[in-house]
Image: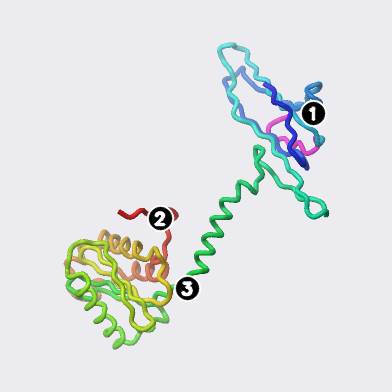
Amino acid sequence: MTTEPFLPAKLQGWGRFDGNWSGVPGTGAVAAYSQDGGASWNPVQTGSNLSGATLQNVRIRLTLTTDNTTHTPLLVPFSLAYSVSVAGGGTGGIDIPAVLGVPVWVLLLPFGVLAAWVLARDLRRVQFDPTDLFLILRDGRLVRRVGGEESPLQDELAVSGMFTLVARFVKDSFGGGENGGDLKSFRVDEKEIEIAKWSYLYLALIGTGAKPPELEENMVRFLKKLDHAHGTDLRSWDGLSSTASVVDPSMRRFLVKGYRRRPFLPHSKT
C-alpha cells in the first residue's frame, strides 16, 4: 500500500513517524518512505524521527507479509508529524507542530475559548463571601450553626437576632409544606440570606456579595446528603446541641467551598 505524494505548504521539517500493526506469528509489516516519486525507498521504523529528511514531498509505503494466505496482519492508522513556518513580520518564522496534518493550535483552540469564557464570567461577578450557616428543623428549632473565623455574627445577641429573622422568614415563606427544593431569600443591611428547604430540614446561608448561580442547587444537594447520612438522628433529635455536633465538619466544609461547587456539565431543571 502506497500513499500519494504529500507536501504541506510552508513545510519547516518532518517529524516522528508512528504506525502500529499486529497479527499472528508469521505475519508482519514493513514501512518505508520515498522522496523521489518512488524511485527509491528508505526503510523506517515506528517511532523514528524523520527530521533529517529533505523538505520535499514524501510518500509512505506499507508492505504486509504473511507465510500463510489465511492469515493477515492488522494495520492500525499511521501518522507522520511535521512542522510548518508562519511568517513573523519578516523576521523569520516559528515552528508549529501538527498531528495528522492538523496544526496543534487548531486542536487547542476550543480549550482556549472555554478558559476565556470561564475567566470572563468570574471577573464580572463580585465575589461572594459566606459568613454563617444555620441548620434548622421544620418546627423552627436551630440544630447547629457554624461561622467563619471572621464572622460578623460572633456576638451571641447578633446571632440570636439573625436566627429569629431566619426562623420567622422560614415559617412565613414555606408554611410547613412537605415539598422540597424551594429557595427563598431576603436581605438585611448588606447581608444576603439564602434559605433552602428539603423535607424536614432548612439551611440558611448568610453572606455578602453576588450569589453564585449554582448556590441553590448546592444547598439542596447538601441537605439531601445530611438527611442520607444523619437522617435517623436528626428526625428524632432530643434538642441537645452536643448530640447534633456530628454535622459540624460537613457544615464547615460547605461554608468554605461546598456552596460554590460547579458541576462540569450543568444539570437540567425540570
Q: Which residue is mark 2?
A: 266
Which span of residues is magenta-colored? 44-53
Q: Residues within 10 Å of mark 2 (few under 14, many from 20)?
A: few
Q: Which residue is mark 3?
A: 126
Q: Residue at x 18, y 63 (%)?
A: 178
Q: Quadrant of residue 112?
A: bottom right
The percent position of residue 161, horizontal first and vertical second, equals: 27, 85
Label 2's element? loop
Q: Is residue 14 above or below residue 151?
A: above
State yes or no: discs 2 and 3 in contact (Cβ < 8 Å): no
Distance between the alpha carbons at the discs numbered 2 and 3: 21 Å
Does the magenta stretch mainly form a helix, a strand or a loop? loop
Q: Residues within 10 Å of mark 3 (few under 14, many from 20)?
A: few
Say which label, 1 or 3, has the lower sequence index: 1
Distance between the alpha carbons at the discs numbered 1 and 3: 61 Å
The percent position of residue 189, horizontal first and vertical second, equals: 36, 84
What is the three-letter code of the residue carrying label 1?
Answer: Gln
The percent position of residue 74, horizontal first and vertical second, equals: 58, 23
Q: Which residue is mark 1?
A: 35
